[in-house]
Amino acid sequence: MKLKITSLFYCVLFIIACQKPTEKEASTSAEVAKLQPIAIVIHGGAGVMSPDSFPEEKRDIYKAKLDEAISKGYEILENNGTSAEAVIATINILEDSPLFNAGKGAVFNYDGYNELDASIMDGKTQNAGAVAAVTKVKNPINLAYEVMVNSDHVMLSGKGAEDFAETRNFKFVDSTYFMTESRLKALQRAKAKETASLLDWEDSKFGTVGCVALDRNGNIVAGTSTGGMTNKRWNRIGDSPIIGAGTYANNATCGVSATGWGEYFIRIGVAHEISAQMMHAKKSLQEASEDVIMNKLENLGGDGGIVALDKDANISMVFNSQGMFRASIDKNGEKVVKIFKD
Ligand code: ASP
């Protein structure tokens, strides 16, 4: 009997000892959360722009807005917000600025008004939402998010997308909200030199906006918002609202947002191709991004670039155009804001 009690005593002691957390295991969930790196990367469009044609004061204005946007997104991630919240808040700042070809500063189509496209993808669920050719929605990225989380669909367009927006209580803006002097002049210039291709890359230049974020839960979300290309016609839709072309996210690989001549990005399936090369060819994010932009896109004759990050918070910003407005904050909190190649 005594032996049995003693063995029971040691047994209980053993169980307690096994359950006693080690110093490392004793960390609070907040401390554990800190071990998961956060990072964010954005672009404000790529295009034909040389340092000479872009005066210092103008560069500073663009850089300040990129800085404001990325800092907002990072702050959300730091405070344990989700990558979706960070992407939307960051893109909203860029959409509300007339500097970029998205929201307020969207380019004009051939018929003299603005048609906006946007998309967002969640790398954890692989859910996605997109809208194309909307004309009254102030922040198209928010509507893309609504499509993702509150509809059975991935992509809605034109009036149908706006009818859906109404059911989600979106407030519309008058189409004059999107009319900026500089974009109107760009349309006039494009029309004056009307080329065989109606799209004017030279005059679209830059401005599509995109963001990819990695949050404390290891979730990657990517989003893109644009006015498309100056002088576009026939309800042309570019790569930005197309999942796999302009936007893609998969927690197992990476998140990507693209900018550039959309027709080429669609044909390559740029954003998905980068993820696929990581998944199947075991390439790093940088290797895959460089192959897709510097080889595949370049060989086809396309221009533009991507911003991307992977599950380990590695960041890539690759472009084959003269410049790309871009910024990143890496896992060490280090911020970079750039326009041209180094
Ligand atoms: N990719 C966009 C489009 O083709 C334009 C851009 O990124 O500048 O609609």
Image (cartoon, rainbow, N blue to C red):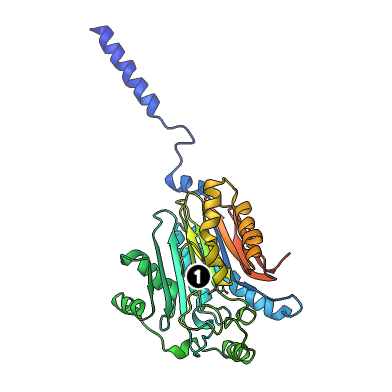
Which quarter of the figure has residue 308? bottom right
Which quadrant contains ligand 1?
bottom right
The spot of residue 194 in percent (x, y) is 61, 88
The spot of residue 17 in percent (x, y) is 39, 24
* Residue 336 visible: no
The spot of residue 117 in percent (x, y) is 46, 75
Q: Residue at x 52, y 52 (%)?
A: 276
Quarter of the picture holding the C terminus: bottom right
Which quarter of the figure has residue 155? bottom left
Q: Which residue is mark 1?
A: 240
Left or right of residue 78, residue 196 in this image: right
Q: Residue at x 51, y 46 (%)?
A: 35
Left or right of residue 165, residue 2 in this image: left
Comparing 303 with 252, the one in front is 303
Callout 1: CB less than 8 Å from ligand 1: yes
Q: Is residue 41 above or below residue 156?
A: above
Element assignment for label 1: loop
Q: Residue at x 39, y 79 (%)?
A: 158
Q: Give the amino acid at mark 1.
A: Ser
Q: Is residue 241 above or below residue 166?
A: above
